[in-house]
Image (cartoon, helix red, strand yellow):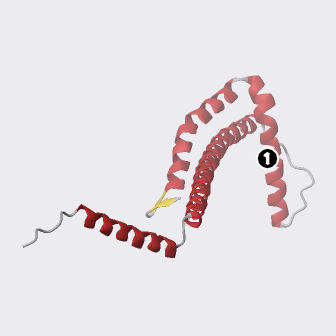
Amino acid sequence: MVVGAFPMAKLLYLGIRQVSKPLANRIKEAARRSEFFKTYICLPPAQLYHWMEMRTKMRLMGFNAESVKPLNEEAAAELGAELLGEATIFVMACSCLVLEYWRHQKNLRRKKGERRAAWTAMRDEVDHLALALEALQAQVQAAPPRGALEELQAQMREVRAQLCALDQPPAPEE
C-alpha cells in the first residue's frame, strides 16, 4: 500500500490515531472521575498488566518473582486509563482494517460476477454462432452440386441465345 515513496499505511494509521485520540482522552477522564469505572474497568486490567510486566522483567533479569506488590490505586487507575485509551485506538484501527477487508472482498465478488456474466454471454454467443454455422452448412449441403449448377448455367445461356435469335428481325435482302 505504497504510492510512490509515500507510505499510505502510516498515513492511515496516523489518521486513525488522530481521530480516536479525543475519544481515548474522554475515556481516560471518565475513568478518573467515575468510581465505578475506575474500580471495575480500569483497576483489574492495570493490576494484571503490572503483575505480568513485573514477573517478566524479574525472570529476564534472572530473579524468581514469587509475589509482586500491586500498584497503588491512583497509579493503577492512571495505568488502566492509559491501557483503555490505547485499546480504544487499537480497536478503531482494527475495525478500519476489517471494514477495508470487507470492502475489498465485496469488490472482488462484484468483479468475479461481472467476469462470470461476460463469460456466460460469450459462451451464449458462441453457441448461437455454432447454430448459425450448422444451418449454413445444411443449406450448402442441400444446394445442387457445383457441376450441375454449371450445366444449368450453360443451358440458360443457350436458351437466351435462342431467344435473342428469335427476337432479332430478319436482315433486309439486297
Could you tell whether 52 is left or right of 160 in the image? right
- Camera-side residue of 149 and 42: 149
- Camera-side residue of 98 and 169: 169
Disc 1 packing (10 Å; few <14; some 14–19; many ≥20): some
Q: Which residue appears farthest toward the left when viewing the image? A: 174
- Camera-side residue of 157 and 13: 157
Could you tell whether 82 is left or right of 166 in the image? right
Q: How far across and how far down the image is residue 134, in percent? A: 61, 61
The residue that appears at 56% across and 49% down in the rendered structure is 13
The residue that appears at 66% across and 39% down in the rendered structure is 88
Q: How far across and how far down the image is residue 169, in percent? A: 18, 63
| Vertical comparison of 62 with 16: above or below | below
The residue that appears at 89% across and 57% down in the rendered structure is 65
Instruction: Identify residue for label 1.
Output: 49
Could you tell whether 168 is left or right of 14 in the image? left
Q: How many numbered callouts?
A: 1
The residue that appears at 58% across and 51% down in the rendered structure is 121
Q: How far across and how far down the image is residue 139, in percent? A: 56, 61
Q: Quadrant of the C terminus?
A: bottom left
- Can you see residue 71? no
